[in-house]
Amino acid sequence: ETGVTQSPTHLIKTRGQQVTLRCSSQSGHNTVSWYQQALGQGPQFIFQYYREEENGRGNFPPRFSGLQFPNYSSELNVNALELDDSALYLCASLRGGGPVVTEQFFGPGTRLTVL
Amino acid sequence: GESVGLHLPTLSVQEGDNSIINCAYSNSASDYFIWYKQESGKGPQFIIDIRSNMDKRQGQRVTVLLNKTVKHLSLQIAATQPGDSAVYFCAESEANDMRFGAGTRLTVKP
């Protein structure tokens, strides 16, 4: 186990709805990254949070947003859900947040299904 | 655009044999490379990493080789065991942007 937890485990939503996913980072880690993993594909970087601020973003539209809290836990929010948003959402925590990426530890993911 | 990819989507090996999983990358500015293992229903698990100033790194039963000339990364698993069956991803990183390949499914036959 990595010490990174995510909730909920599974979620079903309908198109147009909004969803919030949660992640608790490993103790001592101040940085959280979020990834989207479509079925049969590798994870795609959504964004990273370091000390409560966005610290890098992948090619995802603004309806994907996030927060990081003082205890370094994080939320991923997706508005106006689309069918293509169905995927496994992974968070990963690491220590640092500077320009060099170091070893990061993944949670088990949240499986989101959009109907 | 530049991308990370894998040469083979599936690999089947006999228990006890050595496995080699390959990965091609195209971003010459990437300076950090990682191999992950993902079992069904779980998040990716870190296996081994290597920085661009190295060409080889060894761990327990695993070795990563980096050839920057041809932008190629490989993962060697010695004495492959049934517990090694999983999907293996390579990932490359420049700054805090990490990109994953599509993955190779390794199946270990008893």
Image (cartoon, coloured by chain):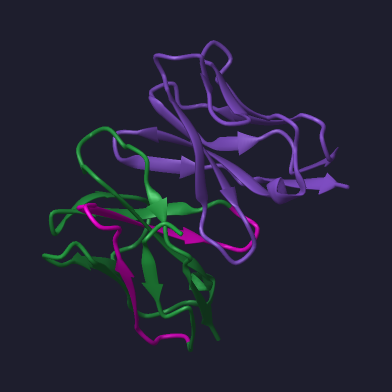
Seen at 58% across and 14% down, the residue is: B70
The answer to whether one can see residue B30 in this image is no
Q: Nearer the viewer, residue B79 or A90?
A: B79
Seen at 24% across and 52% down, the residue is: A29
Outermost residue to the top: B69
Looking at the picture, how far across and down is residue B2, in whole percent? 49, 33
The residue range painted magenta reads A15-41
A76 relative to A93, above or below: below
The answer to whether one can see residue A18 in this image is yes
Which image quadrant is residue B94 in?
Answer: top left
Q: Nearer the viewer, residue B29 or A15?
A: B29
Q: Quadrant of the C terminus of chain A?
A: bottom right
B12 relative to A92, above or below: above
Magenta-span inclusion, residue A18:
yes
Q: Colour of chain B?
A: purple
- Left or right: B14 in relation to A87: right
- Left or right: B59 in relation to B83: left
Q: Colour of chain A?
A: green
Seen at 56% across and 51% down, the residue is: A42
Looking at the picture, how far across and down is residue A47, in whole percent? 31, 55
- Left or right: B54 in relation to B70: left
B48 relative to B40, above or below: above
Which image quadrant is residue B106 in?
Answer: top right
Looking at the picture, how far across and down is residue A35, in whole percent? 42, 57
